[in-house]
Amino acid sequence: MFLKYRSLIISVFLVLAILSGYYATQLKFSFSFDQFFPQGDKDLAFYQGFTKDFESDDNFLLIAIEHSPTVFDSVFLSKFHNLSLEIRDLALVTKVQSLTMLDAPVKTPFGYSTIPLIHKDDPSYYMEDKTNILSDERFVYNLIDSTATSLVIAAKTQDDLGMNESRELTDAVDGLVIKFGFEDKAHILGRAYFQRELIDFQKKEMMMAFIASILLVSIIMVLIYRKPIGIIISLGSIALGLLLFMGYLGVVGTELNAVSALFPVIMLIVGSSDVIHIFSKYVDELNHGKAKNEAMLITIKEIGLATFMTSFTTAIGFASLSLSKLKTIQDFGWNAAVGVMIAYITVIFFTTSVLSLFDKEKIIRQQYHTSNWKNILDKVSFLVKFRQKGIFLISLALILVFIFGISMVGTNYNIEDNLPRGAKVTQDFKFFEKQYAGFRPLEFAITSKTEEKADDFLILKEVDKIEQKVKSTGVIKSSISLATIYRSMNKMNNGNADSAYVFPATEEEFYASKKLLERAVKEEANVLVSAEKNKTRISSRITDIGADKIKELGLQLDDWVNANIDTSLITVRRTGTGLILDKNSEYVTASLIQGLGLSILLITLLMGFLFRSMRMLVLALIPNLIPLLFAAAMLGFFSIELEAGVAIMFTIIFGIAVDDTIHFLSRYKICLQQGMNNEEAVQQTINETGKAIIFTTIILFFGFFNMIFSVNPPTFTVGILISVTLVGALICDLLLLPALLLRFMKD
């Protein structure tokens, strides 16, 4: 038995703790929407090819500056222009556009010339400039809002900025905004800004979750054990497991991401559960008069296997997330599974080694076993024995209600619901959603199927028809294509008449505008057509109406294209990061069902191996499926959309809820083997495991419930739903499971 090597085991864990402390400091945080791209998806592969022909659609940083009642103010325009120039000179910025930096082509008696879009130094032109700008869809909702109360600096950045580069760029932008006195009027949107703000938020969330969980577990351990040695051993074991896990993440180079805030909570509550079961059994054996080593030997034999099974089944539940197509969820699942087993190894070796050094009087209060537990558990036994019919009827009624709730679950994921409540990044996101075209990119890739080039008249005539349809949807405020530029050129060629803001009607008019385009706005046009001139694009942004609604709109647009566009001339395909992200909703449900199904199957096989009884196996699954139904029903009843962060909840619920069932049935099996009849075995099991199950559920409840203080909506949702659901799981394990055993198991 390894207890004779206690000193060596404790020394090894202390060395591992020192190494883990070092590697934990090497952990890095990351945030990128790429993390949520579904791996192996055909649309993702197409988009990656699209970016090679054009460019990424998320390499932008938008800086909006408000000025009321109008931006057409000479002092404001001068400061805004100087800010635009200084942002253009930043190291990681490749190009900048703002209305004060752009010129407009004009037709004169002597040919074509250019004039400033805004005559910033001559207020006499302001009304005319405002009218011309607000009538040009290239600018409104992109570089100026529809009420002319804010202007935007659109900075194009280098592709795939890392965390350090994003922080460097956004910090520099913040400094310039402050320099020009715009800090109270500025709003920022873009990948680099999201990276900085959300990674800072992740760090804060993890630290808050860690501190809250430590305080919670400490309070509960004090209430349970009271003795300093017992409290130190239990908290030390849990903290050691967490430290070893963080060290492991540092060694393998894992980057912490959006869902990593759950790691401290999971490790603390799983470790607490293992510690409490070991503690409880060890003290029981000491109370029966056993010596320390003998008591620990019995504890490891009887509780060690059950604790291993609970840890292993929880790990399987997390590992089943590897079936997800989202790499973020895959990594979370594997790492959480490893973390659960690290917590088990720490408890089964370190905790037992340290614990067996102390007598009962040194680790736990004397009143621990003379409390009111007997009265509470006797009431539970009474209900199980004499109110079985009521328990079954209530359970059946609840199942029917839960099924109805599940039918109402939706997957209309949107970005805003996943941003921290009240944070500056969320307020800025809302500003751009309301005043501008929003954040979600939506691209249309158009490929010529004939010898016609993508920038020729016949091709762009079809592009213009598509773009007009896109803008008519009401949720796409901004759209730009080569057809957009030709409409502006046509208007200029016809005396800037609003009625002339249409695509050229004839090839002669088209090619007249094309000559002007090649001289005046060639650079702007080049990003809209591929180098081989066989592909062009419609670049738009769609408001945050939700993944399901966007998918429905996309299908409607596809049908319209097939019915109204000459598909023998071009092919049209929707793409962009927005479309790829929205596909998550399609995969979430499928991967949830697959992963949870696999988890249930594997855990069922393990329980079957452990208990060797098909009847007991079926009875064991029933009280563990009801909490899952309850959690899913809550999503439907409270209109909570099913998305990647929330889907994790089901795996956590099943993996943890089944733990108490395994502990209960393991003790029940031992009681039967000791010669008790069925009723006696159930009664004895309730008395012996009831305390530990209730203790662990209390810790689980408050461990997850403290997540309601998170300002991250998915974290809040997961915390409160898991907390409430695990209380339901406790009731099922203490009432429904024993009632089923009494009714359907024979002596």
Image: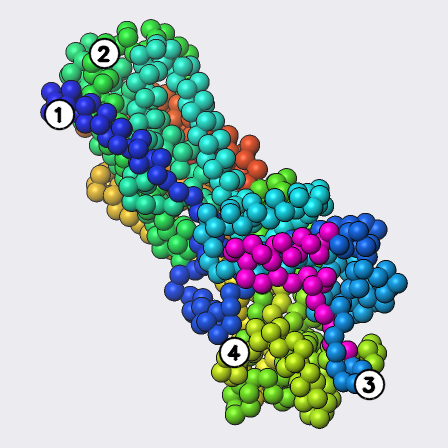
Give the residue number, with chain letter if any, for mark 2. Answer: 358
Give the residue number, with chain letter if any, for mark 3. Answer: 109
Q: Which quarter shows the C terminus?
A: top left
Residue 88 is one of the magenta-drawn residues:
yes
Look at label 2 and name its amino acid: Phe
Q: Position of residue 182 (x, y in %)?
A: 70, 45
Mark 4 crowd level (few <14, some 14–19, many ≥20, 10 Å Cα): some
Q: Position of residue 360 (x, y in %)?
A: 26, 10
Look at label 3 and name its amino acid: Pro
Residue 630, compared with residue 221, is above or below; it is below
Q: Where is residue 706 in the image (x, y as percent from the top left)?
A: 50, 30
**Residue 530, label in figure:** 4
* Cα–Cα gap, marks 4 and 2: 75 Å
**Residue 171, label in figure:** none
Mark 2 or 1, nearer chain start: 1
SS label for mark 2: loop
